[in-house]
Amino acid sequence: MEHIAPFLLLCLLICCSSPLVGAAEPYPGLESLCDEVFTEQLGSGRFVGAAVSVVKDGRLIFAKGYGFADLEQNIPVNPYHTVFRIGSVTKLFTWTAVMQLVEQGKIGLHDDVNAYLDFTIAPHSQQAPITMWHLMTHTAGFADSSRGMLAAGAVDAQDLGAFLAQRIPAVIYPPGRVTAYSNYGTALAGYILEQVTGKPYEQVIDEQIFQPLQMTKATLQQPPSASGERQVATGYAVRNGKPLPQPSENIRPTSTGGASATVIDMSHFMIAHLQAGRFRAVTLLDEETVHEMHAQQFQNDSRLTGMALGFYQIRVNGRLFLTHAGDTTWFSSQMFLLPSENLGIFVSYNARDTVGARQQFMQAFCARYYPDDSTSAQVPQGGEKTAVTPDVAQIAGSYLSTRRPVTGIEKLRQLIEPFYQPIKVIIGANGLLRTINPSAGPRQVEVWEATASGLYERADGQDLLAFTQDDTGQVFMLRDSQAPRAYQKMSAWERILYNRFWPLLFLLVFAGLFWVARHVPANTTCVRFTHGIAVTGILTLLTLGYFGLCQFTAYLHGGTPISLIILPLLLVLNLLCTLGLAAALLVGGKVGSIWAKLPYLASVLLSYAFHYWAWFWQLYQPL
């Protein structure tokens, strides 16, 4: 019996030191709440597996897996062993490592980034050079681009500097003017880490973050390998209610979204950020650095959420969280930090399009444990930015995301992909406003009501809209739930060019030119040029269609499809035929009366319209 007491005491000490056990449960019924929400979500047939971890006051208080990491092999999700691709949450590792070097005086937040590069980023014509601060707040003004950043197979060993130097995006907004979320900006920061430390990015993150925080399953290997107790989740696409396993996706550069981790790994990272930079005996960052990193740095509008350094703010049920989401093709994750409560939550799914599911969980969590509090909903104002509210009549129209591709044929993604398509704003009666968002899935139409502060509040009370006008007269739409990007109002001419029926209309026009050439009296020269316009125009549109249907993915993976070499050649031939027809009509010859010339004049004008459309969508320089 004398040995039983020490044994019981030892068991008690072990239990009390366990991250899942504490003297008092801060969130009673948390497991039942998670079970209810995640079981319902997985039961919808849209998801296969999920995992969640919750930290509070420096310790892990809950972690659990739901569903399957591998449905075919009947392997359940294990929060300690199952690694998920965490996508852009990887960026938080990048920004944390940057701040470590800022502490050491090796990087200046407000230095020109060119001081750390072996190639040059040309600044916007209206402002000072781009700085690390701009990169971390997503205010560098870069256009979006995904080409070469996602691959179905293994990522090649191309030098990161050469890769970035070849793909410098346009700077479409003056730095510091407006948020425009940028993968390239984070990739640039990852390369600066390499330049300053003299080590590969993967080594920097492993030595400075993973190892000190005991993130033993976390890896930057792509694809992640199952080694030791690490279990790799399979990504799934659900089609017609059936989950289909998908091949590994590899992201380049790694600093933008290449990490994989368990929710337990991520709990260690959250604890370090919430405990003034400390995890157990390790100091990841100084307390002052953590405070600076978490403090609001930039707002598109002083009434809305804004950007911290790397993190961005969101409001959930009146509570102001720091967050970062990560969405790959087949995985999605999100981290939520509430520093005022020492609370951190991390969720991962091995499926895509889980924005609604993540919001549902957080709203359920806050509804139970943090009832709506109007005082906590107040957003601190950062900086001296003054918003000018446009007249109500100026608000209606269509708005493009500040995060959008503008160069090469990738610009066409604005026309065909819901994520980039314009959002329509319609002013209704009684102060109501409607937005139609193609990327919002089933909830495309949202209704907003004007408030006394000049904002618009969504019908469910969970989001706000603001409209501002800059000193150039440009109108922007800003969402409280989307601090890392804004929406710029389109001109009337842009709205015309964004009509997706133009290619079909031009195809019909070129087909009609055959009829013109055969049935309207003219000389042989006019007939030949008209046939040339029709044939090359039809071939151009068919080549464009073939690229979109069969070769677009290869292009985004960094390839050079043959269709994009043929496309500008066909356009040039079409233009030469158009110029030839115009010259034939000007010279006159035996074309006939003015009435005989009119159909050919119309053909020339229609062809010029086609070339203007092709120029606008970058078809002359598709690569």
Image (tube, helix red, strand yellow):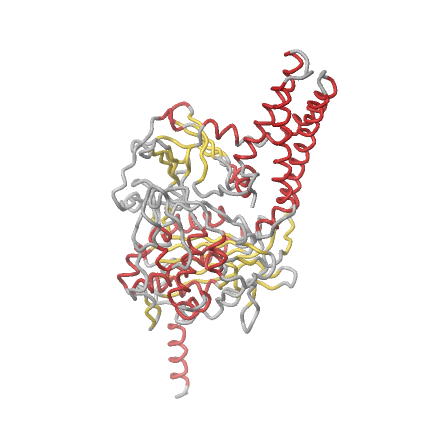
Say above or below: 215 vs 414: below
Q: Residue at x 46, y 31 (%)?
A: 398
Say above or below: 587 vs 388: above
Which of the pair 187/602 is nearer the observer? 602
Q: Residue at x 29, y 64 (%)?
A: 105
Location of residue 288 (image quadrant) = bottom left
Residue furthest out toward the right: 518
Instruction: State how many labels appear.
Output: 0
**Quadrant location of the N terminus?**
bottom left
Residue furthest out toward the left: 384
Q: Is residue 457 visible?
A: yes
Left or right of residue 193: residue 38 = right
Say above or below: 594 vs 295: above
Which of the pair 99/51 is nearer the observer? 99
**Residue 573 place in picture, x, y as percent:** 64, 35
Left or right of residue 377: residue 21 = right
Q: Is residue 34 visible?
A: no
Which of the pair 407/54 is nearer the observer? 407
**Residue 383 place in picture, x, y as percent:** 26, 45
Which of the pair 176/603 is nearer the observer? 603
Location of residue 173 (image quadrant) = top left
**Residue 325 place in picture, x, y as percent:** 45, 52
**Residue 472 place in picture, x, y as percent:** 33, 33
